[in-house]
Image (cartoon, grey):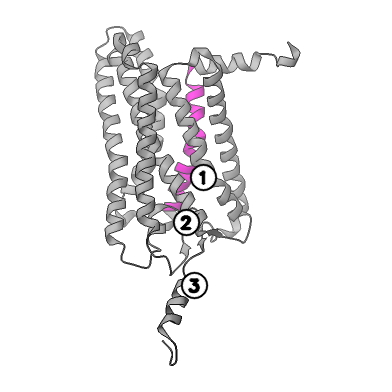
Amino acid sequence: MSPGTHPNDTVKQVNQSCLTEITLLGFSDFQKTQTLLFWLVLTFYLVALAGNSMILILTIANPTLHTPMYFFLQNLSFLEIGYTTTIIPKTLDHLMSDNLTISFVGCGIQMYFFILFGITECCLLCVMSYDRYVAICKPLQYSCIMSPTECARLAAISWAIGILVTFVQSVQILILPFCGPNRISHFFCDILPVLRLATTDTFKDELIVATVTVFFILVPFLLILLSYILIISTILRMPAAKNRRKAFSTCSSHLIVVSLFYGTALFTYMRPKSLYSIDNDRILSLLYTVVTPTFNPIIYSLRNKEMKAALKKSIGRKPFFLR
């Protein structure tokens, strides 16, 4: 404090220095390839939007797809649209402009929806594996167990867990003082980079965040793994090879999507510190925020006879004004 400075003036200066915006360094060090990266990210984003929107429209409009599996797929496609839209538009803006800032409020909102969609997707993929388990291991009881009411309840629980956990974690972080550095070496407001901007000791907060993250990634993953152990053991006991192939085909799309999502998520949030680097983190984040949501609808549409039939029927249908 300089001579003649009143303590209240110092408090005012500290309060005035509190963050109003955050600089997302993102890919600012990729000067030579930013334009190429912009077009790649934009292409993936548009394909992800088109593919997931197509699945939403087909599963809602086509009565043959009004089954539990496609009901959960609707929820997954909606999540993927929200997941990418939370992050990618701002990333594209940063790639094509010199303005790398985002308002503190905007950063908090982005972080909130990123956590919400991520946790809800973990829970929903777990629910979808349970649906496949019942379909293959308890086929005679399937329609009773996976009734429309039960499906709605399971989807609602997935969303409720996501909303509750996200609210608690966001409040825990955003009530901290942020009056220091405002630069994040990332292209979006991920939870740990934002937490580390707080001008206080965040060790306990980081421990809580890490525990919650591990719990809501690892526990659903282990439940999915258990479901598929039971599914595979049931399939291998089937006497007819045709039945085994059919059973495997009903699970293959979900299994590929789970592998893509959890493969990147587990390595991103649970890898040892010795493998951590800013470049690796950004590349992995691009995979699960852009690439995976792009491939999910492709996997479900190309590997699914019912989806392909519904798509052909929709394409072949004349517009209402030509009927």
The amino acid on which the numbered mark 2 sits, given as a three-letter code, is His
- Which residue is rendered at x = 37% and y = 36% of the image? 160
- Which residue is rendered at x = 35% and y = 12% of the image? 143
Q: Residue 16 carries which label?
A: 3
Distance between mark 3 and mark 1 Cα atoms: 29 Å
The residue labelled by disc 1 is 86
- Which residue is rendered at x = 44% and y = 48% of the image? 112
Q: Which of marks 3 and 2 is nearer the N terminus?
A: 3
Quadrant for the C terminus, please: top right
The residue labelled by disc 2 is 186
Quadrant for the N terminus, please: bottom left
Labelled pair 3, 1 in contact (Cβ < 8 Å): no
The amino acid on which the numbered mark 3 sits, given as a three-letter code, is Gln
Q: Position of residue 279 (x, y in %)?
A: 44, 55
Q: Could you tell me if residue 309 is visible in this image?
A: yes
- Identify the element where label 2 is drawn: loop
- Judged left or right of residue 1, residue 62 is right
Between residue 120 and residue 214, name the one nearer to us. Answer: 120
Q: What stretch is highlighted in magenta?
A: 281-305
Outermost residue to the right: 322
Distance between mark 1 and mark 2 Cα atoms: 15 Å
